[in-house]
Amino acid sequence: MCDTEQTPETSAGPQWGRLYAILPLAVGAFLLVEASVPVPGLRAVLRYAIAGGAWGAIVWWVRANRTALDQLEWCACASRTLRVRVVISEPRKSRRRWAPETPEPVVVAVGCPARVADETAEVFTGQPV
């Protein structure tokens, strides 16, 4: 499996300091809101905003460090023995299948029905009726 005598390649690990900074900042914001906001409705809205912001920050941290978190469980030689195939393909050129090749004329008529029929016949045949 892995050769333990070789030195492992260095890779950047997760940035734990940023994760550890989220909780104290959120708690400090909660304490500031509790101490300085006298209106109960506004205080409740700010509590939810701080909780949502802390949750969003944790989600951002996990997404930013997902590769480093995955590599924590790898053995020392995994970076040399793992093969990754990258397939690069160009996107297909968009072509609307529902559009006809040659546009057909659209007739919109307003007015007397007898006159509309005459004008419509003239459009399609090219001859006055």
Image: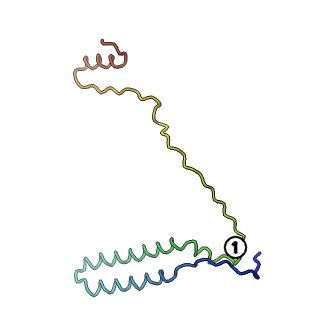
Residue drawn where x is 27% and y is 25% of the image: 109
Q: Tag 1: Cα neighbours inside 10 Å, few (<14), some, or many (≥20)?
A: some
The percent coordinates of residue 59 (x first, y second) are 47, 72
Q: Secondary structure at mark 1?
A: helix
Location of the C terminus (image quadrant)? top left
Mark 1 is on which residue type? Ala
Q: On the picture, is 114 further left or further right than 60? A: left
In the image, residue 3 lies at what x, y percent? 77, 78
Residue 35 occupies quadrant: bottom left
Quarter occupied by residue 87: bottom right
- Above-or-below relation of 116 to 20: above
Q: Give the camera-side residue of 110 and 3.
A: 3
Task: Name the residue that disc number 1 marks.
Answer: 78
Q: Is residue 128 left or right of residue 69?
A: left
Question: With 33 as the anchor, is 6 left or right in this view?
Answer: right
Q: Quadrant of residue 108?
A: top left
Report the front residue among 43 and 53: 53
Instruction: Residue 93: give x, y in percent of width and height.
Output: 52, 44
* Identity of the residue drawn at 46% across and 32% down: 100
In percent of width and height, residue 51 lies at 38, 77
Q: How is the image coloured?
A: rainbow
Question: In the image, what residue occupies the spot 49% across and 37% down?
Answer: 97
Above or below residue 12? Residue 105 is: above
Answer left or right for 107 relative to 79: left
